[in-house]
Amino acid sequence: MIIAPSLLAADYGKFAREAQRVARSGADWIHLDIMDGHFVPNISFGPGVVSAVREQCRSFLDVHLMCSKPEILIDPFRKAGASQMTVHVELGDAVSGLLWKIRSMGCKVGLAINPPTSISTVRPFLRQIDTLLVMTVNPGFGGQEFIHETLPKIQQVAAWRRAGPGFFHIEVDGGINLTTARECARAGADAFVSGSDLFRQRSLRRGVEKLRKAVVQAGAGVLQGAAEPSAALR
Ligand code: DX5
Ligand code: ZN
């Protein structure tokens, strides 16, 4: 089971220290939200910033590309130290080639799906990925409210995963707090991105601990093998 604080909610004035704080919080992954101002109506940061985070820690860097043209970014983010790169299924015909390209660069492969998109669109790619990221808000901004209508999608992919030949993480992202994380864990999620809720707490380490406890109690604890990708980097 994976806890992945999102640096989108960090204090940008002391980004390097914030990265160190997450790396020492007991979290499994660091989630990095890359927004291009086109795929989503916001801009965050690029490979230079990810590279600066990499210099601060050896943590598993989970790079979420909310970008219209990830093909021009995969190589720069790999060089910056990404451990996993996630692209969106909404990119249509480009998806298969993008997943292949990420894999060929030696990174873990993620596929994300937005709340309005039909879950059937991800099914053809499940054998090609390490992580399926189910967006639980419409991407673009931190601090939004969890969309409950995404829960059946998590249940559906969890059913496909149980029936299928291989393991992939089911990651949730957006509006995750103790309550919504429990709901997602019960639906079958095993990787939890949290920005605003974690960073608003005085102790990030304590926040990560509480979140982990909540999802383990809700049932995600059975997926112990899910910790494997972060361990691979240690
Ligand atoms: C939303 C991003 C999320 C965001 C989550 O577009 O993909 O990763 O940082 O932030 P919170 O936890 O504040 O909803
Ligand atoms: Zn994200």
Image: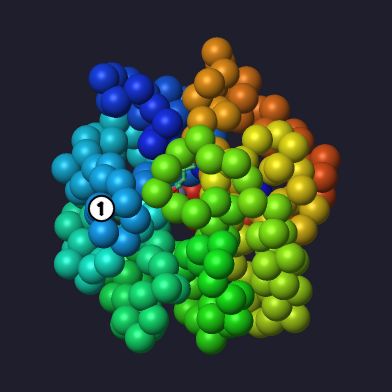
Is 209 situated above or below 76?
above
Q: Nearer the viewer, residue 173 or 51?
A: 173
Residue 207 sits in which quadrant?
top right
Residue 13 sits in which quadrant?
top left
Position of the C terminus by quadrant: top left
Residue at 63% in and 45% down: 146
Q: Nearer the viewer, residue 144 or 53?
A: 144
- The residue carrying mark 1 is 37
Is 76 situated above or below 160?
above
Q: Position of residue 4 (x, y in %)?
A: 52, 42
Is 144 situated above or below 131?
above
Residue 157 visible in the snapshot: yes
Residue at 68% in and 67% down: 153
Mark 1, secondary structure of its residue? loop
Residue at 39% in and 27% down: 10
Q: Amino acid at mark 1?
A: Gly
